Amino acid sequence: MIRKHIPNLLTCANLVCGCVGIFFVFSGDLLMATYLIWTAMIFDFLDGFSARMLKVSSPIGKELDSLADMVTFGVLPAFMMFSLIREGMTGYSWLAFAALAVAVFSALRLANFNVDTRQSDQFIGLPTPANALFLSSLPFLEGSTLDWVLNPWPLLVISLVFALLLVAPLPLFSLKFSNFRYSENRIRINFLLISLLCLLFFRLAGIPLIIVVYLAMSAGYHIFGKSN
């Protein structure tokens, strides 16, 4: 049956985006690499959605999804950060290799996700797509009051901090809705509204802020109580 292969085809499209994105990084076109990460995120959403809708989920599909995510949301953003850091450093360009920690910890994150039963309705550690979205959107801060972040040393620190966040024992709320009642989805709906405001006011430069808000709201949610 053709339909059972649809989710895997979408996953492979995700993987192709990652591979082509790596090519564009080494060609010096980080903007195209960023757009390919964002396109891959759509495929990543659609493969899971189609698998559930068509009821054709399989262990192979789960493993293939992790392998594709490793390339697109692990290796690709790692090389993007490597390129940005190395370009701005003089005399210490070898330190840019530290950005590859993003790829290493993405692998650890994905391997742990596949065996951790606690992550069915929440995440433990920053998901690799969210991490890739944050890192790939940093260049859009250029020209804003936060463009100092694009200097090599802040980028190096960000790479290492966000690599650690991938495996940090930090519970993060999921955006999965079991229903649409506000009383049961308060944190999710509030987060989506804040995200919309960030995009309206800051446009693409608001994307890194959205990920920071996500981390802050998740921390507050689990520290001060789970009152959805």
Image (tube, helix red, strand yellow):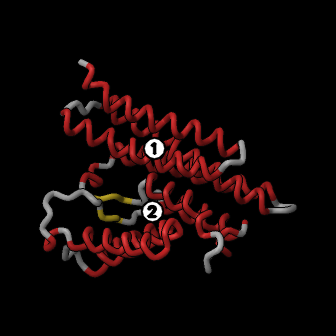
- Three-letter residue code for mark 1: Ala
Q: Which mark is residue 168?
A: 2
Q: Is residue 222 left or right of residue 36?
A: left
Q: Quadrant of the C terminus?
A: bottom left
Q: Is residue 22 left or right of residue 36?
A: right
x and y, in percent, of residue 187 in the image: 26, 72
Quarter of the view holding residue 151: bottom right
Vertical arrangement, residue 144 with respect to residue 204, above or below: below
Q: Nearer the viewer, residue 71 or 95?
A: 71
Vertical arrangement, residue 63 with respect to residue 126, above or below: above
| 10 Å crowding of disc 2: few (<14), some (14-19), many (20+) | few
* Residue at the spot 56% in from the left edge and 57% down from the top edge: 136
Counting residues from the start of the chain, the first of labels 2 and 1 encountered is: 1
Q: Secondary structure at mark 1?
A: helix
Vertical arrangement, residue 183 with respect to residue 8, above or below: below
x and y, in percent, of residue 172 in the image: 34, 64
* Residue at the spot 60% in from the left edge and 70% down from the top edge: 141
* Residue at the spot 38% in from the left edge and 70% down from the top edge: 195
Q: Which mark is residue 40?
A: 1
Q: Which mark is residue 86?
A: none
* Residue that protrudes farthest toward the top in the picture: 1
* Residue that protrudes farthest toward the right in the picture: 91
Vertical arrangement, residue 215 with respect to residue 122, above or below: below
| 10 Å crowding of disc 1: few (<14), some (14-19), many (20+) | many
